[in-house]
Amino acid sequence: MKKTLLLSAAILLTPTWVMAETLKEAFETHRAMYGKDHTFTWQGKEYSTNHPEELEARVEPTQGNATALLELAKAENKKAASVGYEWKLTRGLLKNAEAAIKEGEYQRALNLAAQAKYHARIGIEQHAYAEKNWQLSVPQ
């Protein structure tokens, strides 16, 4: 009885970040708990809860930087579209980023382009998951 009680307590009190089996799970847990700009340790290494696109948008807000990130976002979205997983809102984000550049709002353009690039990247990941697990959508 005592062993069962101790084992149950140990399982229930184990922090979720210890139970994370993959870096992605650990990242998502810490991102949900602490938001961006948090540092966490997983398997002895330190990681940040920032998405790569958020880091790319943290450059000096100039026309050149905004245009460069917009081009990267367009290229990533083109990849997502080529596999059939372009998200509906991504084109709107790209258009809004272009408009922000024309209006001279470079930080806004960087943020919008980063969002578009993120959505395109997740669309590509969604395609990879669907290809790997297509049989789950087949009725039994």
Image (cartoon, rainbow, N blue to C red):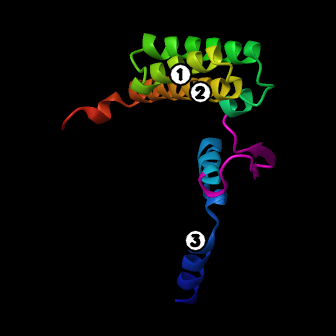
Q: Crowding near pointer 3: few (<14 within 10 Å), some, many (20+)?
A: few
Say left or right for 63 vs 81: right
Residue at image point 62% right, 27% down: 114
Residues marked 1 and 3 touching at CB (< 8 Å): no
Query: Label 1 to label 3, Cα distance in Å?
Result: 48 Å
Residue 62, numbered circle: none
Query: Residue 10's x, y, as percent?
Result: 62, 75
Residue for point 63% across, 49% down: 31
Does the magenta segment cover residue 123?
no
Q: Amino acid at mark 3?
A: Ile
**Label 2 secondary element:** helix
Q: What stretch of residues is rendered in magenta?
A: 32-51
Mark before the other along the chain sequence, 2 or 3: 3
Give the residue type that dot 2 points to. Answer: Leu
Of marks 1 and 3, the one in the foreground: 1
Q: Residue at x 70, y 40 (%)?
A: 50
The residue closer to the viewer here, 25 or 49, is: 49
* 41 in magenta: yes
What's the distance in space between the residues labelled 1 and 2, CA to CA? 7 Å
Q: Residue flagged by tag 1: what amino acid is it? A: Asn
Residue that label 1 marks: 96
Residue 11 badge: 3
Give the image location of residue 92, x and y in percent: 46, 22
Quadrant containing the C terminus in the rendered view = top left
Q: Position of residue 127 (x, y in %)?
A: 43, 24
Which of label 2 and label 3 is nearer to you? 2
Q: Dot 2, how many residues are within 10 Å of its Cα: few (below 14), some (14-19), or many (20+)?
A: many
Whole-number angstrom distance, CA of label 2 to CA of label 3: 42 Å
Q: Secondary structure at mark 3?
A: helix
Mark on residue 112?
2
